[in-house]
Each structure stands twice: as structure tokens, then as C-alpha cells.
Amino acid sequence: MNALMIAPCGMNCALCIGHIREKNRCEGCNGNDQSKPNACRTCTITVCEKRLATESGFCYDCPIYSCARMKSLDKRYRSKYGMSMFENLAFIKEHGMEKFLEHEEKRWKCPECGTQLSVHRKECMECGWKRPFYAEA
Ligand code: SF4
Ligand code: SF4
Ligand SMILES: [Zn+2]
């Protein structure tokens, strides 16, 4: 995991199935636009002027933090995938990027086989271990 994979909204693109998959692999929010699916290519957070004017480039530095777009994104991820953009951003702001990446590596490692998990998958793709914090569809 590396800092370039952390999107301005707090998403860790290293955990995204769009990045993990072999076919049509997305380079992540900070990567080449061409590799991204439409939803991420047209994401309003990436082009938000308030964000672009911040020193850090992250939404936590926004003067109105946070907006409706961030709230709905966070709600969707919390309820559907057991992950919070706001929690991620708060961690980065408080402890810094290096500590966040260490924390993420531990948090998203399968306890059974050590494979890195995907935020978008209920189970470890290697051994089938079930994530306890993943909402049932
Ligand atoms: S699809 Fe979107 S969330 Fe997933 S890695 Fe690409 S930019 Fe990140
Ligand atoms: S929280 Fe602020 S910087 Fe982030 S998308 Fe919303 S308005 Fe833009
Ligand atoms: Zn596993």
C-alpha cells in the first residue's frame, strides 16, 4: 500500500476491486483517468475547487467539511462495505499518512491466510474467510 493509492475522499484505492482485479485494472483515483470506470472518472470530489485549494489535497482541510457528496459516499460505504471515509480522513489528519498505511495493512489482511482483502468483497478472495463487519445484502 502507498500514499498515492489514497484518494482525496479517504478511499483506499488499493482495496478496491477495480484495482485488485487483473482485467481492466484501475490505477486508482490519483492515477490515469483512462483506466478508471466512469463513476470515478466523473467524480465531483476530484475536481472540487475547495479541495484543490487546500494544502493537503484531502477533504478534511475543506472549509465546509463536509458536503452532501462526501456524506452520501461515507454513508454508502459504511452501510454497504463496513468502511468509513470520514474515519479514514480523521486518522490521516491525526496520525499522518505513514501510520494510516500501517494501520490499513493490518486492518485489511485476512487473519486466516494473510491475503489482502477487498473492501468490496464479503470474503477473502483466497481462502473464503468472512469479514464480520461486512453488511449482509
Ligand atoms: S475504481 Fe475508483 S475507487 Fe476503485 S481504484 Fe479506481 S479510482 Fe479508486
Ligand atoms: S468536503 Fe469540501 S473539498 Fe471535499 S468534495 Fe466536499 S466541498 Fe469539496
Ligand atoms: Zn484469506
Image: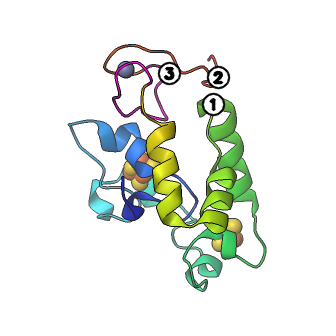
Over which residues does the magenta segment extend?
Answer: 111-123
Tell me which corner region of the image, top left, top right, bottom left or bottom right, holds residue 24. top left
| In the image, residue 67 lies in the stretch drawn in magenta | no
Amino acid on which disc 2 is placed: Ala
Please name the amino acid that badge 1 sits on.
Lys
Q: Secondary structure at mark 1?
A: helix
Question: What residue do we see at 42% from left, 33% from top?
Answer: 109
- Of 29 and 6, the residue lying toward us: 6
- Kindly tell me whether residue 38 is visible in this rendering: no
Residue with the mark numbered 1? 80
Q: Secondary structure at mark 2?
A: loop
x and y percent of residue 56 in the render? 56, 78
For ligand 2, which image quadrant applies? bottom right
Measured as percent of width and height from the top left, residue 111 is found at 45, 23
- Residue 43 is labelled as none
Q: Position of residue 60 (x, y in %)?
A: 68, 69
Inspect the image, locate mark 3, and give the three-letter code of the amino acid beneath it: Lys
Q: Residue at x 31, y 39 (%)?
A: 20
- Residue 119 among magenta residues: yes
Report if the beta carbon of the residue with label 1 is closer than 8 angstroms to ligand 1: no
Is residue 41 shown left or right of residue 10? left
